[in-house]
């Protein structure tokens, strides 16, 4: 449980990080909250020559809640849980943060670290996919943005190129009346999502004006339940419609299998959790 030796730099600016990464992108690792990376180093699953601590970089911190919402990559789970301005506009950040691990992990772990790490069972990927968020990335070629649904490529694999840094999450302010749910079946040992479902639904009366569903835990990476979303749009949210949308989401999911949950069980959980999340919207009206 002792990491291999490495050099350590506490970076003070993003340009410094990008410069250092260019020297040796494969032999360098960034550390944000360290709650995933430090155990990885201790188990020697990674042995970087250089560790760059990005935790002091001001431009990666903070939140702006206006017509566009910008969340810096270094924002911790606890800050997302506590923010009243964010919670008033996008309560799903509060709902999901509240289900992540424990106060110790929430106080150190960052949303940027979680998204960049792309653990297939992490919570934030489902949320940013459901919100149609854009992820802002900085690298040697400048800045770019990518839709969250295109960011997650495979287990622990994202669209980040070597030498790039995830800098922020951008979300458009939702239209008035949009409703949010986050549901998660926790792994009993780790607390991560066996299946997690993030739902954003606009309702005009009981007619769905728009629906967006992000799913984590089920497959190798978070995904948008597009067939279910298309099916729901324009429909009255009845128990039958909900059941069909949940079936479509479950059918779409290419589920993982492990010693705790088989692929069939995960498919079943996608169906029940999507159905429960949607049903709770009509129960609340
Ligand atoms: C006991 C325990 C329980 C947990 N339970 C949950 C849970 O229920 N749900 C959940 O979602 N998560 C859970 N986590 C994970 C936790 O949320 C982590 O904090 C998170 O996954 C990683 O964030 P971090 O800031 O600690 O990243 P780090 O560990 O510092 O970094 C993780 C990886 O991302 C890279 N990285 C970090 N920041 C950036 C960036 N800005 N740009 C590019 N690359 C970057 C690092 O190089 C590293 O490869 C748990 C962790 C622990 C230890």
Image (cartoon, helix red, strand yellow):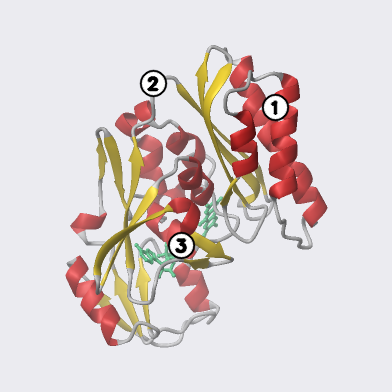
Determine which of the numbered discs, if any, sits on residue 176 in the image. Answer: 2
Q: How many marks?
A: 3
Whichever of labels 1 and 3 marks the residue nearer the N terminus, that label is 3
Rendering coords of residue 52 (x, y %): 30, 74
Neighbours of disc 2 within 10 Å: few (<14), some (14-19), many (20+):
few
Alpha carbons under labels 1 and 3: distance apart: 37 Å
Query: Are there few (<14), some (14-19), or many (20+) residues within 10 Å of tag 1?
Result: many
Q: Nearer the viewer, residue 238 or 126?
A: 238
Q: Residue at x 42, y 55 (%)?
A: 109
Q: Nearer the viewer, residue 87 or 208?
A: 208
Location of mark 3 (residue):
35
Residue 87 is left or right of residue 200, and the answer is: left
In this picture, is 82 found above or below 114?
above
Give how far across and how far down residue 209 sits, in percent: 51, 24
The residue depicted at 75 percent of the width and 23 percent of the height is 240
Q: Distance of mark 2 from mark 1, alpha carbons?
A: 22 Å
User: Quadrant where the C terminus lies?
Assistant: top right
Residue nearer the viewer, 117 or 77: 117
Q: Is residue 101 visible?
A: no
Q: Quadrant of residue 248?
A: top right
Is the CB of the residue bearing disc 3 within 8 angstroms of ligand 1?
yes
Residue sitting at 18 percent across and 70 percent down?
Answer: 15
Front disc: 2 or 3: 2
Q: Quadrant of residue 145?
A: bottom left
SS for callout 3 = loop
Instruction: Kindly identify which residue carries mark 1.
Output: 242
């Amino acid at each position: 449980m002792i990491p291999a030796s490495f050099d350590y730099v506490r970076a003070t600016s993003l340009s410094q990080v990008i410069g250092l990464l260019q020297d040796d992108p494969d032999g360098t690792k960034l550390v944000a909250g360290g709650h995933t990376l430090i155990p990885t180093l201790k188990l020697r699953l990674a042995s970087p020559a250089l560790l760059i601590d990005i935790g002091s970089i001001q431009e990666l911190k903070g939140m702006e809640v206006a017509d566009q919402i910008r969340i810096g990559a270094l924002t911790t789970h606890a800050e997302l849980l506590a923010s009243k301005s964010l919670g008033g506009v996008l309560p799903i950040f509060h709902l999901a943060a509240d289900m992540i691990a424990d106060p110790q992990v929430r106080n150190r772990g960052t949303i940027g670290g979680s998204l960049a790490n792309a653990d297939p069972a992490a919570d934030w990927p489902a949320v940013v996919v459901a919100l149609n968020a854009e992820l802002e990335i900085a690298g040697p070629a400048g800045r770019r943005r990518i839709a969250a649904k295109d960011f997650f490529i495979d287990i622990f694999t994202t669209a980040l190129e070597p030498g790039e840094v995830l800098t922020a999450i951008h979300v458009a302010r939702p239209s008035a009346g949009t409703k949010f749910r986050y549901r998660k079946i926790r792994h009993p040992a780790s607390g991560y999502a066996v299946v997690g479902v993030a739902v954003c639904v606009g309702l005009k009366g009981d007619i769905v004006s728009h629906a967006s569903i992000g799913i984590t835990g089920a497959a190798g990476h978070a995904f948008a339940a597009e067939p279910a979303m298309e099916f729901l749009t324009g429909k009255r949210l009845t128990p039958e419609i909900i059941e069909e949308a949940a079936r479509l989401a479950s059918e779409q999911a290419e589920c993982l299998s492990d010693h705790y949950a088989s692929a069939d069980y995960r498919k079943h959980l996608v169906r029940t959790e999507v159905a429960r999340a949607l049903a709770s919207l009509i129960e609340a009206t």
